[in-house]
Amino acid sequence: MRTLYVALAIIAALVLQTTLSPILDRVGIAIDLGVVVVVFVGLLTGPAAGLLTGSATGLAQDALASGIVGVSGLSKTLVGFLAGVLGTAFVVARPVPRIVVFFGASLLDAGIFFGLHVIFDPRIAPPAVATVLVRAIASATAGVTAFELMEAWPRFAERRRLARSKARVGGRGG
């Protein structure tokens, strides 16, 4: 069942990425939702799942893009594995460490991706440092927000369930 959720998260990230990119590019915001999903899964489930999620996400992005196939697959595979290692080696349960991990993972992904592009196709110029930093900040913000929502959901559902049961009990007794 967990594999299905990861596959749906990858598909949702790719759909949102392709849908929102033209809109966000106009206002100067770049985000890589693929990195967000890869790091999220890596932190939650460990290095093996992070590696597999990174490989699937990266190869799917490569298939959708018109660049060199395998470059994004390799960069996201390494990022997913390292996020999983960090998630098992350190306590990454608070927002600040998560921001650091998402930010660093986004920078690492961009470094590997554009480094490999420079090696294989020197005609492609790497993006400006500001663009990479904005993408890393946006990805870190999205990743931490996803964690906060995931952790808040059970509390919200429990409060809602309790409110419904109180309403049922109060309605019968009066």
Image: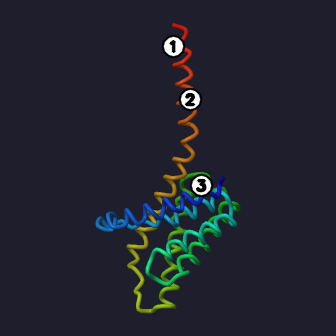
- The residue that disc 3 covers is 5
- Return the residue nearer the eye: 91 or 83: 83
Report, in whole angstroms, how far the alpha carbon at label 2 lies from the one at label 1: 15 Å
Residue 90 location, x and y as percent? Answer: 67, 60
Q: In the figure, residue 42 lies in which quadrant?
A: bottom right
Residue behind mark 1: 171
Between discs 1 and 3, the one toward the N terminus = 3
Dot placed on the residue nearer the N-terminal end, 3 or 2: 3
**Residue highlighted by disc 2:** 161
The image's colouring method is rainbow
Residue 123 on image: x %, y %: 41, 92
Q: Secondary structure at mark 3?
A: helix
From what the image shows, is residue 89 above or below residue 157?
A: below
The amino acid beneath tag 3 is Tyr
Spatial CA span between label 3 and label 2: 24 Å
Chain-order first, disc 2 or disc 1: 2
Q: Position of residue 166 (x, y in %)?
A: 55, 20
Q: Secondary structure at mark 2?
A: helix
Q: State the CA–CA distance, disc 1 to disc 3.
A: 38 Å
Q: Nearer the viewer, residue 69 or 145?
A: 69
Q: Is residue 117 above or below residue 75?
A: below
Query: Looking at the image, which residue sits at the far left?
Result: 26
